[in-house]
Amino acid sequence: MPNVKHQKWWGWGEENVFFTYENKPAFAPIVKRAVGIDLRHRERDTVDFGTAQVPASRITDAQLAALQGISGAENTLTDDHDRVIHWAGKSVTDIIKTLQNRFDRVPDVVVYPGSEDEVQALVDAAVELDLVLIPFGGGSSISRSLQARPEETRTVVSVDLGRLNQVLEIDETSGLARIQAGVLGPDMEEQLNARGWTLGHFPDSFNHSTLGGWAATRSSGMQSDKYGDIAEIIRGMNVVRPGGIVRLRPLPSTSTGPSLREMFIGSEGRLGIITEVWVQIHRQTEAREVIAYMFPTWQQGLTAMRHIHESEVHTTFARISDARETEFSLATQKAPTSLKKTVSAKGQDALWALMRKRGWDTDAMCIAYVCFEGTKQDVLRKKRRVSGIVHKQGALILGSGPGALYDQKKFDTPYLRDFLLEQGVIGDVSETAAPWAKLTTVHKNVYDAAQSAFDELGKTGWIMSHMSHSYHSGACLYFTFAFEYSDDVDHEYALVKTRIQQAFIDSGGTLSHHHGVGAEHSPWMEQDVSEGGVQLLRGLFQIADPGENFNPGKVIDSPDTLHKALRNGEAG
């Protein structure tokens, strides 16, 4: 079996890593108020794969022999465990279906190519034998970009690029690196750090996603304020297509017609398989510090975030949670276990009391985190500039303690989602981007849309948000919602999610800032990029892939959407 890391088959992340609430005294009460349930102790440490009822592979002996001839029998697997790992991503509905043995269309075979030449042979074989190829990186997608169409009758091949995991070349003078697309985030950073460099791209899924996956889904990282979104980071790439490779050189800028680089970024496997990527890299910084601030209101905090960006302080990131997310975040704090921590907790309580005496509504306050990097002098200068900006909006500086804790725990949130699933609660996310002038409207309308869905379902629901990823003209708003689900989970989830997505579009936002389109967001593409834009994409996909061999049904024209789940639920 190939030496490729995967997440556990039944949930997010690694086996034996869990969220626990017993050491967080404020957590159970806020969950009770948010979604109306009493928490119980976690009972599920793992799930026996023997309980999985996996549909049989449909691959023929001749097809299997052809694929084995390309990558070897040891790298061409049809066992049920490997096929289930590759059947879907890690959206909350993917996990529910996996646990309930509701496998729509499992890949028939998983192939682990060991070179670009092998990928070329696989692509050519797909056209010749009429196979469906679905590229697979870390499997962290939450937009359903990895599933085959449920009605697909042809043999489905998951192409796992995990063996293509090396930093191949670093151009020290230009600050460029040539990296294989299947490398996981931590493995790539380890190789770059060993030579004093970093990519600076850290999405929430960093531990379990790949460079190629970031490119294919138009990813954005937590530190994009400094390092850029993946579309800005990528300077060139190799994309394997039938009959040959498109090679885009790592040029700083070019005026050679419509951008092929931009065309492949976000294409989700529909135009070919990305095998190598040229990226811009940065020297590791001397100093790094994350400072926490508390604002009296969401609007004051949002204004401060905009002014920080306008001031060109060049922070690594600047984000703020709204009042509900601030309250929830504080509720995940552990009970103090030492004298120092006890004193710190009492100091926080005293601070909140002082703020109330000064007229603060502590139910409305919002916490923000700003990251500074550079030389020690740079960091100090930037902190002073930001202090002046936030003080004008009434903020209190909480310091580096809370900021350091946030930095340490930034990749852990999905484990909380899996914990809630065991409690019978869906906790999921949806994100957008909009101009600064529309962010407040988007925020309010999304809250109203989610509440309308909760009311229609007769459920106690929760929604919260934070702002991240600032740009000259606007920013990303990232929403988290939760509710207790029933046997009608498909309809319930679809109702809440579609209301939120439609509110994005109706309020002037985009359907997704960095999670991609997949099948989940496909129905909103025409509203987002216009009917003419969808027609252009449809024409592009038809010409580039006339046989629909490359991840069909993603980005546009998906037959398996949230709207379909809504119709099925209403019919039921």
Image (cartoon, rainbow, N blue to C red):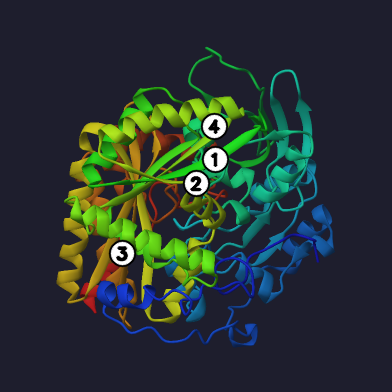
Q: Dot 2: within a 10 Å radius of its alpha carbon, few (fewer than 14), some, or many (20 or more) residues?
A: some
Earlier along the polypeptide chain: callout 1 or callout 4? 4
Q: Which residue is mark 1?
A: 289
Report how far apart the C-alphas of labels 1 and 3 lie in the structure: 47 Å
Badge 2 element = helix
- Residue drawn 50% across the image and 51% down it: 401
Residue 349 shown left or right of residue 174 in the figure: left
Earlier along the polypeptide chain: callout 3 or callout 4? 4
Report how far apart the C-alphas of labels 1 and 4 lie in the structure: 16 Å
Image marks 2 and 1: residues in contact by CB distance under 8 Å = yes
- Residue drawn 18% across the image and 43% down it: 441
Give 278 or 396, whichever is nearer the viewer. Answer: 396
Nearer the camera: disc 1 or disc 4: 1
Q: Which residue is mark 2?
A: 400
Q: Which residue is mark 4?
A: 227
- Residue drawn 51% across the image and 52% down it: 204
Above or below — where is 141 with respect to 106? Answer: above
Image marks 1 and 4: residues in contact by CB distance under 8 Å = no
